[in-house]
Structures are given as C-alpha cells and as structure tokens.
Image: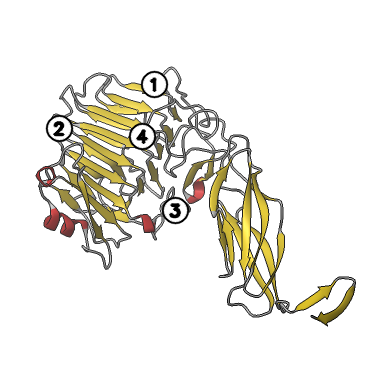
C-alpha cells in the first residue's frame, strides 16, 4: 500500500501558499509509491493561483488537496465562511487551480472571486492523458455577476472527471455578467467521461457550456438542481448527454425523471446563502436517483438516502434523531475510598428511520460513564455511572453528565449528579438500626 505523505499550506504551516508547496514538492509519486496529501487551511487573498505540473501519478498514488479537517465544522461545511479553508480566484491569471495531473482530488475547499474583472474560471483542467481521473468533491464557489467565473473549465481534456456534492452560487449585485457552472473545450477522445452528480447550482448562465466535441452520452448528470439559471440548461454546441433526475427553473431540463420550469425549490435560508434543502421542500427531497459509492454521502458526510430516497442537490435531508433520557438527576452515596454506581437509559425519540449517535462526557474527575458513546435507532441503551470517592474528603460534590449528538434536534441533554462522600464507620463499632447509640465490642 502506498505511503501517504502529508504537507500543510496556510499561515504558520509547512508552506505559505499552494504555489510554494507545488514548487517544492512536485515529484514522481508512482516511483516513490506515495500519495501526496496537502491539507489546506484558511488563507488570505494573496495565495493563488497554483499550476499543478510536474507530478507523476496513477490511480493509487495520486495527488489530494483537501480542506484541513480542523477548519471544517458541521456549521460551515455547507456554507461559504471566512474562517475555513478558502482559495481566491486570482484576477490576472483568472483561475485558482490549473492542473494537468493525471490523478488528482480537490476536496472540501471553498473558492471565491474578485468583485471586478472579466469572465474567468475557477478550476482549469488541461489533462490530455487518455486515462486518469480528476475529482472535485464537496467544494464551494462563491462568485458574483460583476465578475462571474465558471466553476470548472476544461481544454482538450481527454481523461475522466467526477464533480459531486458541490455548490456554486452567484451572490448577485448590479450587472448581468453570468457564467456557466462548467465550460467544456476540446474533449474529443472517446474515453472521456464527465460526471456531474448531486450538485447545487444557483445563478449560473447554464449548467454546461459546450465548446467541444465530447462523445455522445459521455457527459452524465444526475441529481443536479439549478435555480436562477439565466439562459438554458445547456449552452454552446449541440451535444448528446445522459441527464436525468435533475431539477431546474429553465425549460427543457433533459431526462424522463427531470423537472423543468421549477423555480421554487425551498432552501433553508437562500438570502444568507444557506442552500441546504428545507425539510418541507417538495421539489428535490426523495426525488433523486439512487447512486452507489462513493456518491452515497452528501457534503455533510450524511449517508444517502436520508429518508426514503436520494435527494437532488449537494445536501441530503436526513431523519432527525432526538435524545430521550429516563433521568435528569442522579444521587450517589459512598464511604471514603469507595465508589458507587447507578444507571440511566438513552433512547432515540426522533423521526422514523433516524439514528442517534451519542457521546457522553462529564465535568468531574470522580465521575465516569460507560459506555461513553454509542448509537440507537429503536432500542434502549443502558449507561452505568460510577462515582469514585478516592482522594475526596467527606462532603457533597456536584457534577454534570452531558449527552450529545450534533444531528439531534434537542442536543445536548444533561443529567445533574450529586455525590455524597460519607465518613467510614470504624471497624470496631457496631451500629444497631433500632438503637442509634454506638456500642463498643
């Protein structure tokens, strides 16, 4: 198995920019039997662009650029925010990443554009290998119609590409400068396959603008939602595509299971650029096509389907769990140097089909719970709480047990714990319950 070598890019990291990392690290990964993983951190607006050249890769020894896990939380994974891994589309070159690498993954990075400038592209791929795979997964591009950028531009791209769980949105503003989500140019090799799966596209001129001779049905679209599309689903040269289970506000969205002229897809908070599906949406939820791995998770890492069938778009609405505890307080008593145990139970009181994945923590050194984590759907889990008086003086102590599941609608839940440590009875004394006096032996 190939060894994974990790480098970091960001303030105070291994390299200050992707360009510096590329210049220092570009190498033959195949002969070295390595995977190069570049963890990308939050950056300022001067760290771009990067030309990915000089790498030799194959299907197992490839190049991975991904958003640093510490930058990404459940609250910002789906939304453009300034505190997480973000890359700037440099106005002079007009791209953030240029690549001719045979095998390359870009994962969980957000991109944004300047507010002025001509129409450019965010990601430029010029891979002329007849075999290879470029993947763009869980990425976000925030652009504006003053300097609208396409998300992806290809030129004589003979390889294969997969773009899934991505969000493109035009934040608006004065003007009418729109661009397509993807612009194709020069795809003539019959092996070329481009898959656009489970993407959400807002405010583009079209989903795909074709300037190539891509072979028939080599462009595959599934579970794509397009809203505020300005011109048409496709622009440019005519092409035969394999498109189905898509939703758009324009006429003639291809596919027997697609829906055209739909402009009222319900998002949670589109004015503030939160394009997760509202749980009450009727246009996209449960209307997608079932896709196999690795397309069976959404941008949040939630397993598809969340309810009864796949949703359309980058976000999957899932059945929401709830935490039900049978106790809110516990009182334990022990003599000095001894411990005491009690139990409580956890149930999932959420929506049908949901799973509660809980974690149990506490705020006292003398307090513990086992098991400290678990999951439940319809069953009841019993948790054993132990209070240990070792090292504690006689007296009363308080602590809190917290049960958490970030997906639950009532997380966290707490149990207040009282622990009374008592003075141990001397061994040479007898206590008679019917007589409170102590009798010496």
Give the secondary structure at mark 4: loop
- Which residue occupies the extreme top position in the image? 256
Camera-side residue of 146 and 370? 370
Camera-side residue of 128 and 386? 386
Side of 245 relative to 325 (left or right): left
Counting from the top left corner in percent of width and height, residue 384 is at: 62, 55
Q: CA distance from mark 3 to mark 2?
A: 35 Å
Q: Residues within 10 Å of mark 4 (few under 14, many from 20)?
A: few
At horizontal 20% and vertical 43% (from top left) the residue drawn is 62
Pick whichever of labels 2 and 1 is earlier in the sequence: 2
Residue where numbered disc 4 is placed: 294
Q: CA distance from mark 1 to mark 4?
A: 24 Å
Residue where numbered disc 3 is placed: 76
Residue where numbered disc 1 is placed: 254
At horizontal 60% and vertical 53% (from top left) the residue drawn is 411
Pick whichever of labels 3 and 2 is earlier in the sequence: 3
Q: CA distance from mark 3 to mark 4?
A: 22 Å
Quadrant in which the C terminus is drawn: bottom right
Q: Residues within 10 Å of mark 3 (few under 14, many from 20)?
A: some
Residue 287 in sight from this viewpoint: yes
Q: CA distance from mark 2 to mark 1?
A: 25 Å
Give the secondary structure at mark 2: loop
At horizontal 36% and vertical 43% (from top left) the residue drawn is 138
Residue where numbered disc 2 is placed: 156
């Amino acid at each position: 198995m190939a060894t994974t070598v990790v480098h970091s890019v960001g303030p105070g990291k291994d390299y200050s920019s992707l360009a510096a990392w590329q210049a220092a690290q570009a190498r033959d990964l195949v002969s070295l039997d390595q995977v190069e993983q570049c963890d990308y951190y939050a950056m300022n607006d001067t760290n771009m662009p990067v030309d990915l050249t000089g790498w030799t890769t194959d299907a197992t020894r490839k190049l991975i650029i991904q958003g640093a896990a510490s930058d990404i939380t459940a609250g910002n994974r789906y939304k453009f925010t300034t505190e997480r891994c973000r890359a700037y589309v440099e106005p002079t070159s007009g791209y953030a990443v240029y690549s001719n690498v045979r095998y390359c993954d870009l994962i969980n990075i957000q991109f944004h554009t300047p507010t002025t400038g001509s129409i450019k592209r965010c990601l430029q791929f010029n891979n002329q290998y007849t075999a290879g795979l470029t993947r763009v997964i869980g990425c976000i591009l925030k652009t504006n119609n003053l300097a609208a950028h396409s998300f992806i531009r290809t030129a004589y791209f003979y390889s294969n590409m997969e773009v899934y769980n991505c969000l493109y949105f035009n934040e608006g503003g004065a003007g009418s400068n729109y661009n397509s989500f993807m612009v194709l140019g020069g795809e003539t090799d019959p092996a070329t396959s481009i898959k656009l799966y489970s993407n959400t596209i807002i405010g583009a001129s079209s989903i795909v603008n074709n300037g190539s001779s891509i072979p028939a049905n080599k462009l595959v679209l599934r579970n794509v939602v397009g809203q505020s599309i300005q011109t048409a689903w496709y622009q440019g040269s005519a092409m035969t595509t394999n498109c189905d289970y898509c939703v758009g506000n324009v006429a003639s969205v291809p596919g027997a299971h697609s829906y055209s002229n739909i402009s009222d897809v319900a998002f949670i908070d589109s004015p503030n650029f939160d394009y997760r599906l509202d749980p009450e949406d009727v246009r996209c939820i449960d209307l997608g096509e079932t896709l196999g791995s690795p397309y069976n998770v959404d941008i949040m890492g939630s397993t598809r389907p969340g309810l009864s069938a796949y949703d359309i778009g980058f976000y999957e609405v899932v059945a929401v769990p709830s935490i039900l505890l049978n106790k809110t307080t516990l009182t334990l008593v022990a003599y000095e140097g001894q411990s005491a145990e009690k139990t409580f139970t956890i149930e999932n009181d959420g929506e049908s089909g949901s799973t509660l994945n809980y974690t149990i923590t506490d705020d006292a050194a003398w307090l513990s719970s086992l098991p400290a984590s678990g999951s439940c759907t319809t069953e009841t889990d019993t948790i054993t709480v132990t209070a240990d008086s070792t090292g504690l003086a006689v007296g009363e102590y308080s602590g809190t047990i917290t049960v958490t599941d970030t997906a639950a609608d009532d997380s966290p839940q707490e149990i207040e714990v009282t622990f009374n440590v008592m003075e141990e009875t001397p061994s040479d004394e007898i206590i008679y319950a019917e007589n409170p006096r102590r009798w010496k032996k």
